């Protein structure tokens, strides 16, 4: 019977639970939205027919009930008039109408139930569409925020890596500069006085070694040697 055959499935569906299990909620929302709009269109299209069936069933039922009342009244009048045979015919016809009424009542009950089901489905689908629309807006906002954050993170990462490279280069340059300055300062430090004195003594010792190779430390012998040198010069 068209969309009514899916009444239980539509009423039992839980949009939020289905979306929570979806691997791609954004795509799933769009798919469900298309399906729900299609179902809503079918419900609206079939509701008019179902309501028409319900009104027709109610009219026929009311007519049958009115006929039963009329036959009951005719039978009573016939009894009052002493026409038992006529009263019996009215009551027999009434019994036929009562049996018909029972069938018509069942038909009307079904038509009424279908009309109520259509109304419930329309409300349920409308509610699901509202929930989906809200979820879709939230998802799109989250997706946009996520993409923006990812882009920001990517930019921040590149900037951080570039900063690290420049920092390393700057540290290297600073180290080279510090080494150069330390060497310059070392060269600019004046030699210690003792070092200079040692250098002079060492120079004097070398000179003495070249000019006097006499290693005799006895003063008398050294004096005799000096006299001999002087005599030789004369």
Image (tube, rainbow, N blue to C red):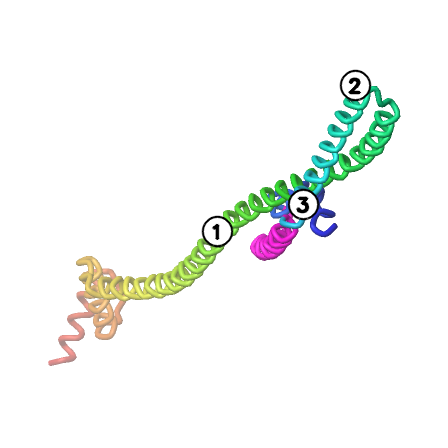
Residue on which the image places disc 3: 10
Q: Nearer the viewer, mark 2 or mark 1?
A: 2
Q: Earlier in the sequence, mark 2 or mark 1?
A: 2
Q: Nearer the viewer, residue 133 or 193?
A: 133
Q: CA distance from mark 2 to mark 1?
A: 77 Å
Residue 38 inside the magenta-drawn segment: yes
- Of residue 227 and residue 155, the one placed in the foreground of this image is 155
| Quadrant (top left/top right/bottom left/bottom right) for the C terminus | bottom left
Q: Mark 3 or 1 closer to N-term?
A: 3
Can the viewer see residue 24 in this picture? no
Secondary structure found at label 1:
helix
Q: Residue at x 73, y 32 (%)?
A: 65
Residue 233 position within the rendered picture, expressed as x and y whole percent measured from the top left: 13, 80
Q: Position of residue 123 (x, y in %)?
A: 58, 42
Q: Which residue is mark 1?
A: 137
Mark 3 vs mark 1, foreground winner is 3
In front here: 1 or 57? 57
Mark 2 secondary-structure assignment: helix
Query: Magenta span: helix, strand or loop, mainly?
Result: helix
Q: Is residue 215 located in the magenta-colored stretch of the structure?
A: no
Q: Is residue 169 above or below residue 75?
A: below
Please tell me which residue is depicted at 13% across the width and 75% down the height of the picture.
Answer: 230
Q: Contact (CB < 8 A) between labels 3 and 1?
A: no
Quadrant of the image occupied by residue 124: top right
Gap in Å between the C-alphas at discs 3 and 1?
23 Å
Q: Which mark is residue 94?
A: none
The residue lying at 25 percent from left, 64 percent from top is 181
**Whole-percent x and y of residue 18?**
64, 46
Label 3 packing within 10 angstroms: few (<14), some (14-19), many (20+): some
Q: Which residues are magenta?
A: 21-47
Q: Which mark is residue 80?
A: 2
């Amino acid at each position: 019977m068209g969309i009514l055959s899916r009444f239980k499935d539509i009423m039992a569906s839980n949009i939020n639970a289905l979306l929570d299990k979806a691997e791609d909620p954004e795509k799933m929302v769009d798919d469900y939205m298309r399906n729900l709009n299609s179902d809503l269109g079918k419900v609206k299209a079939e509701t008019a027919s179902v309501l028409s069936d319900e009104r027709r069933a109610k009219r026929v039922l009311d007519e049958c009930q009115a006929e039963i009342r009329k036959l009951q009244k005719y039978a009573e009048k016939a009894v009052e008039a002493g026409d038992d045979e006529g009263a019996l015919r009215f009551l027999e016809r009434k019994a036929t109408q009562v049996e018909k009424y029972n069938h018509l009542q069942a038909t009307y009950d079904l038509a009424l139930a279908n009309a109520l089901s259509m109304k419930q489905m329309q409300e349920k689908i409308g509610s699901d569409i509202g929930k989906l629309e809200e979820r879709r807006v939230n998802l799109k906002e989250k997706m946009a925020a996520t993409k923006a954050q990812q882009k920001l993170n990517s930019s921040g990462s590149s900037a951080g890596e570039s900063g690290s490279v420049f920092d390393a280069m700057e540290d290297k340059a600073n180290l080279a500069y510090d080494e150069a300055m330390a060497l310059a300062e070392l060269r600019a430090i004046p030699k210690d006085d003792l070092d200079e004195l040692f250098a002079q003594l060492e120079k004097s010792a070398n000179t003495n070694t070249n000019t006097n190779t006499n290693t005799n430390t006895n003063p008398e012998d050294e004096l005799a040697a000096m006299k001999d040198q002087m005599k030789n010069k004369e």
